[in-house]
Image: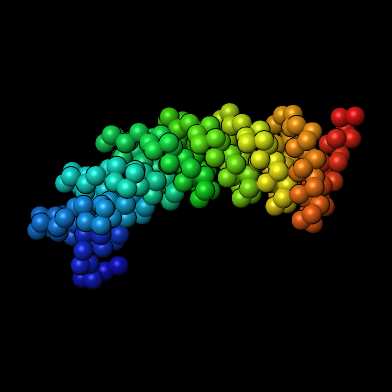
Amino acid sequence: MKTENVKTLADAALAGDVQCTRALLDAGADVHDQNDLALCYAANRGHVEVLKLLIDHGADVHAGHDEPIQEAAASGQIECVKALRDRGVAICANDDVALVAAVASNQVAMVQFLLQNGARVHARCEEAMRTAAKRGYTSMVEVLIQNGADWHAQGDEPLIRAARNGFTEIVKLLLKAGEQLRISRDEAWREAVSNGHTDVARMLIDYDAGRS
């Protein structure tokens, strides 16, 4: 976006234009316009200096139920998350909305950062693990397991969802991580078969055969 096309504070934030953002603020632009949209844009795009400038001019770091940190996490903007944290936003704000957003966007590095800095891996009934498993994010599932996520969440939902969607590597990870209930393995097998994932179905059969 070219500076001459910037007309609003949100436009300037989206473009990462510090000079234009400052000029608009000095001219009286409403930093809270559209529920602090400029701050959310800066967080999402990783424009740290713009983000800091907006906050220094009174932007609400908790706007929209902590939307700024959610936007930063979803787009993998670690420096923006740090800046928001340094200005009073808890890493686990709004029931770990940042962690949930980062997992949903498959931002592995961001999830590692969040978990190392206070995010709760078990938040929202293991939503992070359940989301990663059902979407097929293998590396994310590994990171969550390493950080103590419960692979039995909601009646072994991660295993059942992974089997339903044919995510062989995730099924393998979950079986390796620890004992799954037999009733859950049976349901996972049925889901795999009914959805044509014969490789997953075979893996589950082999797993049970190896235990007998």
Residue shown at 80% from the left, 45% from the top: 189
Residue shown at 50% from the left, 34% from the top: 123
The picture places residue 104, in percent across and down from the top left corner, at 52, 48
The picture places residue 14, in percent across and down from the top left corner, at 30, 59
- Relative depth, front residue between 1 and 44: 44
Quarter residue 176 falls in: top right
Q: Report whether 44 appears left or right of 198.
A: left
Q: Is residue 48 above or below residue 113?
A: below
Looking at the rendered image, the quarter that the N terminus falls into is bottom left
Residue shown at 61% from the left, 50% from the top: 135
Quarter residue 140 falls in: top right
Q: Examine the rendering and report whether any part of residue 72 can be seen.
A: no
- Relative depth, front residue between 83 and 208: 208
Looking at the rendered image, the quarter that the C terminus falls into is top right
Q: Is residue 124 above or below residue 10?
A: above
The picture places residue 150, in percent across and down from the top left corner, at 61, 31
Residue situated furthest bottom in the rendering: 5
The color scheme shown is rainbow
Q: Is residue 164 above or below residue 148?
A: below
Count of numbered tags: 0
Q: Report whether 90 appears left or right of 113.
A: left
Q: Examine the rendering and report whether any part of residue 119 can be seen.
A: yes
Residue shown at 32% from the left, 52% from the top: 40
- Relative depth, front residue between 212 and 137: 212
The picture places residue 207, in percent across and down from the top left corner, at 83, 36
